[in-house]
């Protein structure tokens, strides 16, 4: 009787020795994979950001523009550069087709980034760290970052956002 | 061999298959073939687009302009992920709901109605996408929208598929009520029933997502971005779980067809399908792990299918399918050492090589990468990178599509009653296709690991005002080259399959006993049976019954743990604090 034929009426067989050993390992592995996410989230250095709020895209745009105006220290390729003040709050906006502003961070200092979009859905991809977050209009995603290495880090959009998607980038600069 | 003069209850409506011994209700044959042909047409179109897309991302070729790349990406997604797969699944459900359980098709006209509905829907959506009115991907996240006709077509198709899935459940129910099936269902039909049940609630999710999307595209309502993503992935992820259940059903079928294998533990295998039903749709969360708006417990409990219930189901199949093959091959006398049964398998049989490529590729690459991506914190390294694309080509193509192709080599000639054309080519096709896919998937995963995004015309963002230098490197060029070369080989393998199918259905030599390769089954009175006596699995034995399989699954577990540890190391290696 193959899998193509009906089995006998009573088909519930006891679980044999090799099946039992495999099942035991499989169950332990499944439980490990489940528990490790909680362990990571409470004790790990890289935790998934959870905190988020609703906001109107127009309001987020206004807050970001105010923030840029009051924290601006320069400009690169027409994109304003800002330095978050102590207390470490920063706004990072995605729009078609640019991330703004360029954030200039200090190594070792934690910054609380309010991430959202003015228009479409975007994806924030920090390179070459390869850290990726979804950016939704109407929601502020709070991403806390503590840079441990200096240099320039590229941002690219990794959610399709229209025909200019492939020119949408940004930057984070980390200084000593 | 018996001749085809077995009792025919209602005259010309029945025939007996001389290869398998199944009684076949003839009106269902054309329906199966129409759905199979629609599937192959979708696959052909999708494959042509795939080649052009891969050659666009490969900088050395850069084939298409940006607009066409996005247009074809939208069309390729819906053609492959929805139309090819679901048409084939409806063909499989029609096959499983009649021939496999010795039942007539109740409601032939009804079946034609939903098949035509699906074809019309597929044409409307494909035409809308190819004419450039649905460039915002088949996910079309609000506030982006596609043309209303795109959604109209998908909804028509989904309604048809929903009716098809319900029809299968009705077939099984009436077979039971009328006493056609007295005891338990055959395992393959049981598995298809699990797939049909997942399909029903998935397609209902589809309506919940696509009806509002249609209304938004008409300017009648405005959708919330996060709410739509949640609704959409109830459909989008569920659709892939139909494929998973259907693929495992096909695995059991191919194991039986090519080696005569019998399930080692009917009860345990069925329990694994119940675990799929219980847990698997929670996996929709995999797509939302780095989204705003969702709490920690909701993320963790859902992404783990409640403590990995569905993964446990897959791990059960990971043992039971090779164990069934091993038992069958040992009964044939391949008893030396741990792996003679494996090494001396019928590799020249297209269904067998397709089965092995699908099982091994799905397990080692698709399944493991899926669990990595579904781990909440690891998802930060992977979300929306090309690694995701590598993963789902491993699941849906290397796994599901290869398995479906393997089954088509038997079902299509037997149902069409024509010899399988180009048998020599068919023997090589799974290996050719598999090699191309492995190369392409490897390239995608490497590129994703290096930071390449999915769904982007220019992966190096070279036209952006702020340049990102890390996206250009010799290793990235190597990865893109692998993708391009792999796609060329894979498309050649896919074209070979299409050629064989078209030649078989339309030009194959008519035969009452079609030539389809060398099977491990022979015609029995109540359907096929194994050509050799295969002993029952001894569940009380002190010795290991399938030592080779036991060794293999632990090799697999070591690989799984190692990949998880490596991914965890990579996340730690980011160095930056994230929370």
Image (cartoon, coloured by chain):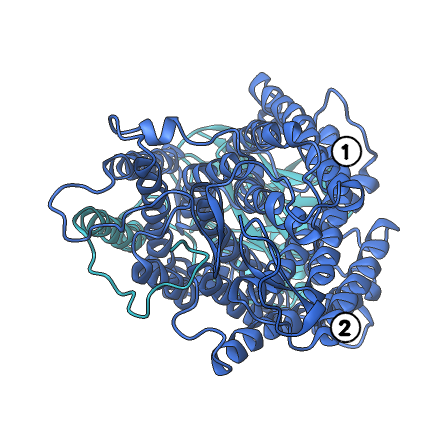
Chain colours: A cyan, B blue
- Among the 4 quarters of the image, the one containing residue B111: bottom right
Depth check: give the residue in front, B430 or A104. B430
Residue that appears at 59% across and 19% down: B478
Task: Name the outermost residue toward the left.
Answer: B542
Q: Position of residue B36 (x, y in %)?
A: 70, 53
How many numbered circles are shown?
2
Tag 2, which secondary structure?
Answer: helix
Q: Nearer the viewer, residue A97 or B537?
A: B537
Q: Name which residue lies at 66% across and 23% down.
A: B485
Residue at image mark 1: B52
Residue nearest the observer in this picture, B129 or B533: B533
- Dot 2: few (<14), some (14–19), or many (≥20) neighbours within 10 Å? some
Q: Quadrant of residue A156?
A: top right
| Disc 2 target residue | B113
Q: Does residue B371 appear left or right of residue A94 in this picture? A: left
| Residue at 79% over, 61% down | B119
From where the camera sits, is residue B257 visible?
yes
Looking at the rendered image, the disc whose residue lies closer to the viewer, 2 or 1, is 2
What is the distance, in whole Å, between disc 2 and disc 1 at their CAs? 35 Å
Same chain letter for marks 2 and 1 = yes
Q: With respect to residue B199, does B46 lie above or below?
A: above
Q: Position of residue B496 (x, y in %)?
A: 70, 32
Residue A164 visible in the shown view: no
Q: Chain of mark 2?
A: B
- In this view, the residue farthest toward the right is B131
- Work out whether B552 lies above or below B211: above
């Amino acid at each position: 009787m193959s899998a193509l034929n009906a089995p006998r009426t009573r088909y519930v067989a006891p679980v044999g020795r090799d099946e039992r050993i495999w099942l035991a390992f499989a169950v332990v592995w499944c439980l490990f994979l489940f528990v490790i996410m909680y362990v990571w989230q409470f004790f790990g250095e890289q935790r998934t950001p959870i905190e988020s709020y609703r906001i109107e895209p127009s309001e987020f745009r206004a807050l970001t523009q105010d923030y840029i105006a009051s924290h601006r220290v320069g400009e690169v390729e027409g994109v304003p550069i800002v330095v978050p003040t102590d207390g470490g709050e920063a706004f990072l906006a995605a729009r078609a087709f640019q991330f703004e502003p360029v954030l200039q961070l200090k190594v070792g200092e934690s910054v609380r980034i309010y991430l959202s979009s003015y228009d479409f859905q975007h994806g924030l991809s920090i390179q070459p760290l390869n850290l990726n977050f979804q950016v939704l209009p109407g929601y502020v995603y709070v991403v806390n970052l503590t840079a441990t290495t200096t240099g320039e880090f590229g941002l690219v959009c990794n959610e399709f956002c229209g025909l200019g998607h492939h020119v949408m980038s940004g930057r984070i600069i980390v200084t000593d | 061999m018996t001749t085809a003069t077995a009792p025919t209850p209602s005259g010309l409506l029945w025939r007996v298959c001389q290869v398998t011994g199944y009684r076949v209700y003839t009106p269902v044959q054309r329906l199966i073939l129409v759905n199979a042909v629609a599937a192959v047409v979708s696959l052909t179109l999708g494959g042509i687009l795939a080649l052009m897309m891969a050659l666009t991302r490969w900088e050395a070729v850069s084939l298409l302009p940006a607009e066409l790349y996005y247009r074809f990406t939208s069309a390729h997604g819906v053609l492959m992920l929805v139309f090819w797969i679901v048409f084939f699944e409806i063909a499989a459900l029609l096959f499983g709901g009649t021939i496999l359980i010795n039942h007539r098709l109740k409601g032939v006209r009804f079946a034609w109605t939903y098949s035509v509905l699906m074809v019309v829907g597929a044409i409307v959506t494909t035409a809308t996408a190819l004419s450039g009115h649905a460039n915002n991907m088949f996910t079309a996240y609000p506030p982006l929208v596609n043309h209303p006709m795109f959604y109209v077509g998908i909804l028509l198709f989904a309604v048809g598929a929903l009716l098809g899935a319900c029809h299968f459940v009705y077939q099984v129910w009436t077979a039971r009520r009328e006493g056609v099936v007295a005891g338990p269902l055959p395992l393959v039909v049981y598995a298809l029933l699990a797939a049909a049940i997942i399909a029903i609630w998935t397609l209902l999710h589809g309506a919940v997502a696509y009806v509002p999307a249609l209304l938004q595209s008409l300017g009648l309502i405005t959708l919330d971005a996060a709410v739509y993503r949640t609704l959409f992935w109830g459909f989008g992820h569920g659709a892939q779980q139909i494929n998973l259940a259907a693929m495992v059903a096909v695995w059991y079928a191919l194991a039986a067809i090519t080696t005569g294998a019998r399930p080692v533990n009917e009860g345990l295998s069925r329990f694994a399908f119940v675990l799929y039903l219980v847990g698997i749709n929670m996996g929709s969360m995999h797509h939302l792990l780095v989204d705003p708006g969702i709490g920690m417990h909701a993320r963790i409990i859902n992404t783990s299918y409640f403590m990995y219930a569905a993964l446990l189901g897959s791990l059960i199949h990971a043992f039971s399918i090779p164990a069934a093959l091993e038992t069958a091959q040992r009964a044939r006398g391949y008893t030396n050492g741990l792996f003679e049964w494996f090494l001396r398998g019928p590799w020249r049989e297209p269904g067998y090589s397709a089965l092995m490529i699908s099982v091994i590729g799905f397990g080692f690459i698709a399944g493991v990468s899926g669990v990595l991506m579904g781990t909440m914190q690891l998802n930060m390294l992977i979300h929306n990178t090309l690694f995701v694309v590598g993963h789902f080509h491993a699941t849906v193509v290397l796994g599901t599509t290869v398995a479906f192709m393997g089954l088509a080599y038997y079902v299509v000639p037997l149902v069409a009653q024509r010899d399988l054309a180009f048998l020599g080519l068919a023997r090589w096709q799974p290996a050719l296709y598999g090699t191309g896919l492995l190369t392409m998937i490897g390239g995608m995963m490497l590129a994703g690991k290096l930071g390449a995004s999915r769904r982007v015309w220019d992966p190096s963002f070279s036209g952006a005002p702020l340049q990102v230098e890390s996206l250009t490197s010799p290793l990235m060029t190597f990865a893109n080259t692998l993708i391009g070369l792999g796609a060329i080989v894979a498309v050649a393998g896919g074209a070979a399959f299409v050629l064989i199918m078209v030649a078989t259905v339309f030009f194959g030599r008519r035969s009452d006993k079609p030539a389809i390769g060398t099977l491990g089954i022979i015609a029995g009175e109540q359907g096929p049976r194994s050509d050799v006596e295969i002993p029952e699995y001894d569940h009380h034995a002190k010795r290991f019954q399938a030592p080779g399989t036991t060794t293999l699954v632990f090799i697999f577990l070591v690989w799984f743990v190692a990949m998880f540890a490596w991914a965890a190391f990579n996340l730690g290696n980011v160095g930056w604090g994230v929370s």
